Image (tube, helix red, strand yellow):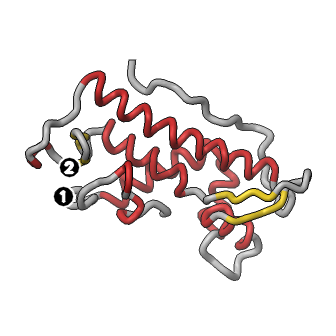
Amino acid sequence: MFVTANDFTGEIQIADPGQGLQSWGAIVDRIEEKYLRMLLGNDQFLELIDQWDDSTATNYNQWNDFVEGREYITADNTTVFYKGVKSFLKYFVYVDLVKDGHIFVSANQVAESNTGGSEVLKGYEKEKFLNERFNLGVSAYNRAFWYLANNDDYDYETGYFFPLQKKTLFK
């Protein structure tokens, strides 16, 4: 849907994502859907999927701006730049891929297996590494929630869900 291999740069690098993962797209789509449904609810999620990339759709601008990001002015005249859905989805996709064993985390890299010559992170170091990335995603997710709740240009339904809380993934 939204996150591609090109989004995994900087602190969340995956060397050749999808290489050896035959169902890369399906796995990423499933993870994205989980978090977008949490944020938007079922009806708005379905509307997003139906309209965000169809420029003739009724609410195309609303959903395209949500996906791609945009600058807007709030009711109190504050200018805000919202970065779009990739700003949080890439972290959640990354963490879920590692948690589910599709990729492995090593000292300064991520690989699909531990055959790259680096020692794969385990135990506390892996948990710490993933928690930090997950919480970066939570921060960006909450900014997306804020965009939905405080955007006067579009009417998003925001009354029935709450922002995510930073947490420890593994205990």
> In the displayed structure, would residue 45 be above or below residue 56?
above
**Residue under circle 2?**
112
Query: Which three-letter amino acid code belongs to the residue tagged 2?
Result: Glu
Q: Residue at x 31, y 58 (%)?
A: 24
Closest to the observer: 83 or 43? 83
Horizontally, residue 14 falls left or right of residue 57, namely left
Position in image of residue 108 (x %, y %): 25, 44
In which quadrant will I find the C terminus?
top left
Position in image of residue 140 (x %, y %): 59, 46
**Element under label 1?**
loop
User: Mark 2 touching mark 1, by CB under 8 A?
Assistant: yes
Q: Is residue 40 visible?
A: no
Q: Residue at x 29, y 58 (%)?
A: 23
Q: Residue at x 69, y 54 (%)?
A: 44
> In the displayed structure, would residue 26 be above or below residue 92?
below
Which residue sits furthest right?
76
**Residue under circle 1?**
20
Q: Residue at x 42, y 48 (%)?
A: 93
Q: Nearer the viewer, mark 2 or mark 1?
A: 2
The residue carrying pointer 2 sits among few (fewer than 14), some (14 to 19) or many (20 or more) residues within 10 Å by Cα, namely many
Q: Which picture quadrant has residue 161?
A: top right
Which residue sits furthest top?
171
**Element under label 2?**
loop
Query: Which three-letter amino acid code belongs to the residue tagged 1?
Result: Gly
The residue carrying pointer 1 sits among few (fewer than 14), some (14 to 19) or many (20 or more) residues within 10 Å by Cα, namely few
Horizontally, residue 97 falls left or right of residue 35, namely left
Closest to the observer: 108 or 29? 108
